[in-house]
Image (cartoon, rainbow, N blue to C red):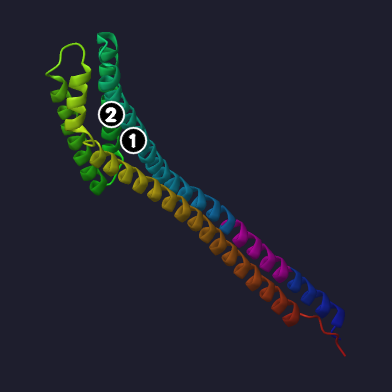
């Protein structure tokens, strides 16, 4: 005579194994996705951070060049305003030359971390800055170790506003670099959010499939009593 309790027991055993296997599969898949997500996100974040670091250094260098040029222009004004004293004339002339070197140094440093289009513009800025400095030096070549009020007035009249085109170009270049930095920061944040949402949706999908599989196993292997 067939024992229905054995049938029920056997069926329950198979049900347990199937359910355990389904749950283990879901757990392993979710764990694998979590590990993959961590490594994938870390790799992408590292790439984004590398680009952001390069753009930050570009923005910083452009800002420093902008600041040093403003100092250089002020030094030029001080040469004309206070250069009647040979000591102050030499002091501000050295400041003028030093700040000019700093402008060029920061612009040249950008050549290794900017795009080809930006490199072309930087090279043009360097050339224009060199021509501007040459004009200033040429104006001082006719004076000795100091500048008289009359000489200062004549020099100022001849060179007044000569720095404005370069100032405008440098300001615009710096503003564009900072704008690009903010755009990259925004894009990096959006990419992080998109990756998180994508991995979350995949995780939820696998969990849902696993839940349906468990439900199907429960319904399909539900024990039935014998007659």
Query: Which residue in the structure is indicated by mark 1?
Result: 66
Which secondary structure, mark 2?
helix
Visible residue check, residue 130: no
The percent position of residue 213, horizontal first and vertical second, equals 67, 75
Packing grade of label 1 (10 A; few <14, some 14-19, many >=20) is: many
Query: Which residue in the structure is indicated by mark 2?
Result: 105
Visible residue check, residue 85: yes
* Drawn side of residue 114 relative to residue 59, left or right: left
The percent position of residue 106, horizontal first and vertical second, equals 31, 31
Residue 83 location, quadrant: top left
Q: Main secondary structure of the magenta part?
A: helix
* Drawn side of residue 31 relative to residue 101, left or right: right
Question: Observer-nearest residue: 140 or 55?
Answer: 140
The percent position of residue 162, horizontal first and vertical second, equals 21, 36
Give the residues drawn in magenta, as a range.
17-32
- 3D distance between C-alphas at marks 2 and 1: 12 Å
Decide whether residue 18 is among the magenta residues. Answer: yes
- First reached walking from the N terminus: tag 2 or tag 1: 1
Q: Residue furthest top?
A: 87
Question: Observer-nearest residue: 213 or 41?
Answer: 41
The percent position of residue 18, horizontal first and vertical second, equals 70, 71
Residue 11 location, quadrant: bottom right
- The quadrant of the image that shows the N terminus is bottom right
- The quadrant of the image that shows the C terminus is bottom right
Decide whether residue 57 is among the magenta residues. Answer: no
């Amino acid at each position: 005579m067939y024992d229905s309790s054995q049938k029920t027991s056997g069926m329950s055993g198979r049900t347990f194994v199937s359910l355990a296997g389904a749950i283990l599969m879901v757990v392993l898949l979710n764990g694998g996705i979590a590990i993959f997500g961590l490594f994938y996100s870390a790799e992408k974040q590292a790439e984004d951070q590398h680009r952001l670091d390069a753009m930050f250094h570009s923005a910083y260098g452009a800002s420093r060049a902008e600041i040093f040029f403003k100092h250089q222009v002020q030094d030029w004004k001080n040469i004309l305003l206070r250069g009647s004293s040979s000591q102050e004339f030499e002091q501000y002339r050295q400041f003028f030359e030093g700040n000019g070197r700093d402008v060029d140094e920061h612009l040249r440093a950008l050549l290794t971390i900017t795009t080809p289009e930006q490199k072309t513009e930087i090279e043009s800025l360097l050339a224009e800055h060199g021509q501007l400095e040459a004009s200033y030096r040429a104006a001082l070549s006719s004076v000795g170790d100091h500048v008289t009020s009359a000489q200062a007035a004549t020099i100022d009249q001849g060179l007044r506003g000569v720095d404005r085109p370069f100032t405008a170009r440098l300001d615009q270049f710096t503003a564009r670099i900072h704008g690009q930095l903010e755009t990259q920061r925004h894009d990096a944040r959006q990419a992080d959010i998109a990756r998180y949402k994508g991995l979350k949706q995949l995780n939820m999908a696998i969990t849902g499939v696993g839940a349906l599989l468990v439900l199907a196993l429960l319904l399909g292997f539900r024990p039935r009593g014998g007659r």
